[in-house]
Image (spheres, rainbow, N blue to C red):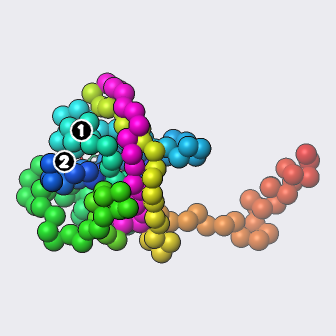
Amino acid sequence: MRQVASGVFLITTSLDDRLHATTATAFLPLSAEPPLILVCLHRDSDTHRALTQTARFGVNVLAENQASLSARFAAKTGDRYRFEDLPRFSGPNGVTFLSRCAAHIEVETTASTAGGDHTIFIGRVTWSQVDPHATPLVYHRRAYHRLAPLAEPAAGSDAEGLGRGLSGAA
Ligand SMILES: Cc1cc2nc3c(=O)[nH]c(=O)nc-3n(C[C@H](O)[C@H](O)[C@H](O)COP(=O)(O)O)c2cc1C
């Protein structure tokens, strides 16, 4: 699994007036019509427990400058359960989000199913917003990375010639 590169997400939800946030990479867009996503959380996680009792949650897509937030909400110590120093806002349906992420997705849970020691939570997207200037954080081989575009093949290079040859042969 270390070779799987993924985005990094903070899953947020509130239960009994207490905000929960946890770091997750197990997030996937699932369906466009209707708009569905899925998130997998370990059954021992506090956020898992909260998600089984709440109707809505938030997916905060971390930006490349937010690796410290990922580390903070993956640990069980320190300022893990404090939010005062973090700018936050409410989505249209009351879900709390952390500000300045690359994107925010508000979700209404529609189904959940066991997947080994995790639960797969499936939800309908009820609202979302994207910061077009932000770049998402990437996690790979237990380290954080930023995206870098592949170089385009230079005009007249071998790669371009090979592509022309193949299309000409078709
Ligand atoms: C980069 C990264 C990705 C993680 N992805 C997941 C995940 O997809 N699902 C999960 O249950 N835990 C994941 N974890 C572990 C949780 O963040 C961690 O167990 C956390 O302490 C759980 O917090 P909670 O008990 O308050 O919910 C990940 C941790 C890191 C550092």
Q: Amino acid at mark 2?
A: Leu
The residue carrying mark 2 is: 15
Callout 1–callout 2 Cβ contact below 8 Å: yes
Q: Quadrant of residue 88?
A: bottom left
Q: Amino acid at mark 1?
A: Gln
State which region is magenta.
101-116
> Label 1 crowding class (10 Å Cα cut-off): few <14, some 14-19, many 20+?
few
> Residue 81 got which mark?
none
Q: Of all residues shown, which one is farthest toward the right?
A: 169
Q: Check the image and report above or below for 53 versus 102.
A: above
Residue ID at (30%, 58%):
94
Q: Quadrant of ligand 1?
A: top left
Tell me the quarter of the image containing the C terminus: top right
In the image, residue 122 lies at what x, y percent? 41, 38
Left or right position of 29 against 112: right
> Label 2 crowding class (10 Å Cα cut-off): few <14, some 14-19, many 20+?
some
> Residue 53 got which mark?
1
